[in-house]
Amino acid sequence: MLNKIVQIWKINDLRKSILFVLAMLVIFRIAAHIPVPNVDVGALKNLFQNNQLLGLINVFSGGSMENFSVVMLGIAPYITASIIFQLLTMVIPKLEELSKEGEYGRQKINQWTRWLTVPLAFLQSFGMITILRQSAADVLPNFTSWQMLVAMVTITGGTIFLMWIGELISEKHIGNGISLLIFAGIISGLPTSVGSTFYTYDQTQIVNMIVFTAIALITIISVVIITEGQRNIPVSYARRIRGNKVYGGTNTHLPLRVNQAGVIPIIFAIAIIMFPPLIAQLFLRVKTSWLAASAQWVVQIFQDQLFYGIAYFVMVVAFTYFYTAVIFHPDQIAENLQKQGGFVPGIRPGKTTAEYLQKIVTRIIFTGALFLGIIAVLPLITAQITSTQSLVVGGTSLLIVVSVVIEMVSQINAQLSMRDYEEI
């Protein structure tokens, strides 16, 4: 491990890339502590601590929402815009064709995603300010219409700023910039959580601490196993002779990961499951009695831990299959194998190979989907067993942290391997 760190530090451009990423994360954390004026930050923190839904939103904003900072929305609008375009790609043929045009198509869709992020950030900032004003009047005392407009513009600008930082980080190939921003927000809250745990520690909590520690270790080990787990499909290439040269005649494998979707299904599920109660909170104080009653019913049913847990679990499993279908195309893989003279032993090339790959993926993805669903609702189960809310978002946080670390290590190792080949 120490030798690897020394090797990384000796490579000038890799060292500069890592230092640049660290500098961007420091800038993000500084921005996360710059609050919008005229906000009672103390009352706001109490509100987030006592509201499970807002606490979950705060995690994905990188912890900046509880400070009502200029980057309080984090990169949530950008993620929402990405989800929208991924869905549109499946239903609009022209977008699907554009997505297959390589680098040009990817850049064009990314450009449209950035444009969509701006109005989404503006609308989400309005919604969050309205919800906070309704949830606790002392959070935003004497907030005028002009101050609200200024706050919305500032928060929208903060989201665009974070989106830009995330893309700069991604260009360094040290990890996904958006994931690293969420990762930094989660890690930044770790010292405070550990400190508060030891500050309020007493002997009656020893059992809960042991249970939480055991769950954390099991979760980390499980995430690593599932993330790195894959099914290797054997592939053989027919021998071809062109002139005096022989091509092919080799055996290799096609890796199919157990969890191809990563943490995207959880982000999708959270975006969907948070939408109804957030909208309902906007209508709690309307004058129309039936509308206010309906909004109150929606809020109450999503506060029911059993309903929330079942809905959350089902959505995570469903989105795992959905996102895998978006990114994995067995017909295209089978076609490419056939063009290159490759085949799966015992399986006919073409359509039969595509059906075989789809069958295998459907089976192994079940394990990944079930695992993600359990991780998502694990904090709710733990809270019921131990009668405490200390791990409200612990499972999701651990999943994101471990996944981001694995991806970051993989990209750094890939750069080291590339430089080894260049030296040879």
Image (cartoon, rainbow, N blue to C red):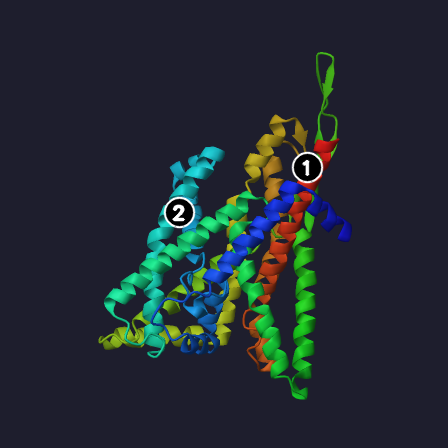
| The quadrant where residue 156 appears | bottom left
Amino acid type for the residue under numbered disc 2? Arg
Q: Whole-percent x and y of residue 221?
A: 70, 62
Judge left or right: residue 409 versus residue 291: right
Q: Total of numbered circles in the picture?
A: 2
Q: Residue furthest left?
A: 287
Who is closer to the viewer here, 207 or 39? Answer: 39
Q: Is residue 325 visible?
A: no
Give the left or right position of residue 75, taking residue 347 as reference: left
Query: On residue 114, which mark appears?
Result: 2
Q: Which residue is mark 1?
A: 418
Element under disc 2: helix
Residue at 70% x, 72% y is 214
Vertical comparison of 356 with 30: above or below:
above
Observer able to see residue 393: yes
Picture layout, residue 94 above or below residue 273 = above
Q: Based on the displayed image, in which of its 4 quarters is residue 398 positioned?
A: bottom right
**Mark with earlier residue (2, 1):** 2
- Residues at marks 2 and 1, CA–CA distance in whole angstroms: 32 Å
Q: Position of residue 48 (x, y in %)?
A: 45, 74
Of residues 230 and 147, the one nearer the viewer is: 147
- Amino acid carrying mark 1 in the image: Met
Q: Residue at x 51, y 69 (%)?
A: 310
Q: Nearer the viewer, residue 262 or 331?
A: 262
- Could you tell me which quadrant the C terminus lies in? top right
Residue 126, image x, y percentages: 32, 63
**Circle 1 SS class:** helix
Mark 2 packing: few (<14 Cα in 10 Å), some, or many (20+)?
A: some
Q: Residue at x 74, y 12 (%)?
A: 244
* Left/right of residue 137 with respect to residue 192 in the rendered view: left
Residue at 63% x, 50% y: name it: 408
Image coordinates of residue 206 in percent, x first then y, are 68, 83
